[in-house]
Amino acid sequence: MPAPHLPAANEGVREHQWKHIDDQTKQLKTAWQELKERGGKADQLAILSPYRPENSSGIRALQ
């Protein structure tokens, strides 16, 4: 949850795990679709990746 002085999105952090890159892409697209359906906007989304954006297949899948 965000600190009390920050705006809350009323969404908790969800961790996704996968073993194959295709599973990663599918999970990210499904999660993003669910967020959009509930009013989520792209500028409210944070993706944590150990890779640079151009090397992250998850970030590239959502672009």
Image (cartoon, rainbow, N blue to C red):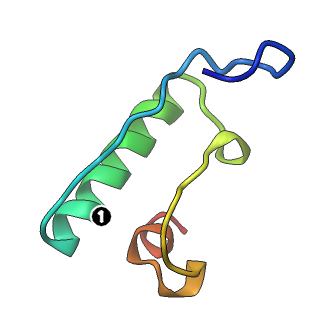
The residue singled out by tag 1 in the image is 25
* Relative image position of residue 37 (x, y in whole percent): 47, 28
Q: Amino acid at mark 1?
A: Thr
Dot 1 surroundings within 10 Å: few (below 14), some, or many (20 or more)? Answer: some
Residue pictured at 37% horizontal, 41% vertical = 31
Comparing 41 with 16, the one in front is 16
Residue pictured at 49% horizontal, 23% vertical = 12
Compared across the picture, whether 1 is left or right of 35 comes to: right
* Relative image position of residue 9 (x, y in whole percent): 65, 21
Quarter of the image holding residue 34? Answer: top left
Quadrant (top left/top right/bottom left/bottom right) for the N terminus: top right
Name above or below for residue 49 compared with residue 44.
below
Residue pictured at 50% horizontal, 69% vertical = 59
Secondary structure beneath label 1: helix
Compared across the picture, whether 5 is left or right of 55 comes to: right
Compared across the picture, whether 47 is left or right of 25 comes to: right
Name above or below for residue 33 compared with residue 13.
below
Name above or below for residue 43 compared with residue 40.
below
Name above or below for residue 16 compared with residue 35.
below
